[in-house]
Image (cartoon, helix red, strand yellow):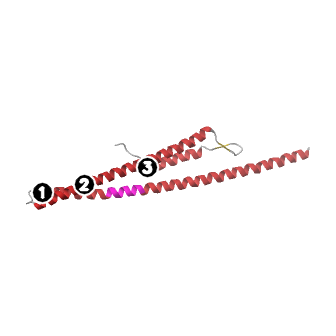
Amino acid sequence: MASMATPKQIWEQQQSQMQRVKNSGIISCNGSPIKDDKEEEMAKSALALFRAKEEEIERKKMEVRDKVQAYMGRVEQATRRLADIREELDALIDPMKKEVAILRKKIDTVNRELKPLGQSCQKKEREYKEALDAFNGKNKEKAQLVSKLMELVSESEILRMKKLDELSKNIENLG
């Protein structure tokens, strides 16, 4: 089976992509933001990549959950079948006591292995949710910062235009 990226690796890759999108905004010499088609396409591409990764994560999470559920169902069926066999054996003079003991040990081993698998699934789901919440929080913070930047740039342009008009009038008054 191919190795899967860890939630941390996926999160770091997404952060790197978001940083590239963030850094793709160019400021011209007068301070106003310029967005050309290439930059917009980069932003759309990064967003599409992020969505695709989110869908892939969700799909893989569901696959793992389904596999665990299927495995647990098979183990439960096997446990029930073995319990029935054990009852039949107990009703007889037990010529297969050794085999029953071996099967019981195997069942106990499988049951012990199931518990950490279930806990691991729950832990990974919590980690995924925490990483997603952190990502969404940072994304919201970025949007607020970009909005504030746009306000500041706009105010700066207005103030500089007023100052230029004032200087132009002063020059006209001299002549």
In percent of the image, x 59 and y 45: which residue is there? 23
Three-letter code for the amino acid on which mark 3 is drawn: Glu
How crowded is the residue under tag 3: few (<14 C-alpha within 10 Å), some, or many (20+)? few
Q: Is residue 63 left or right of residue 50?
A: left
Q: In what quadrant of the picture does the C terminus appear?
A: top right
Q: Which of 43/28 is in front?
A: 43
Which secondary structure lies at badge 1?
Answer: helix
How crowded is the residue under tag 1: few (<14 C-alpha within 10 Å), some, or many (20+)? few
Three-letter code for the amino acid on which mark 2 is drawn: Gln
Indicate the position of residue 11 as horizontal and vertical percent values.
Answer: 47, 50
Provide the residue designation for mark 3. Answer: 58
Provide the residue designation for mark 2. Answer: 77
Real-space Cα separation, disc 3 to disc 1, in angstroms? 46 Å
Taking the magenta stretch, the answer to whether it contains residue 136 is no
Q: Which residues are magenta?
A: 116-125
Q: Main secondary structure of the magenta part?
A: helix
Provide the residue designation for mark 1. Answer: 98
Looking at the image, can residue 106 be seen? no
Three-letter code for the amino acid on which mark 1 is drawn: Lys
Q: Is residue 32 left or right of residue 116?
A: right
Whether residues under marks 3 and 1 lie with C-beta atoms below 8 angstroms apart, the answer is no
Real-space Cα separation, disc 2 to disc 3, in angstroms? 28 Å
Indicate the position of residue 136 as horizontal and vertical percent values.
Answer: 52, 54
Looking at the image, can residue 172 be seen? yes
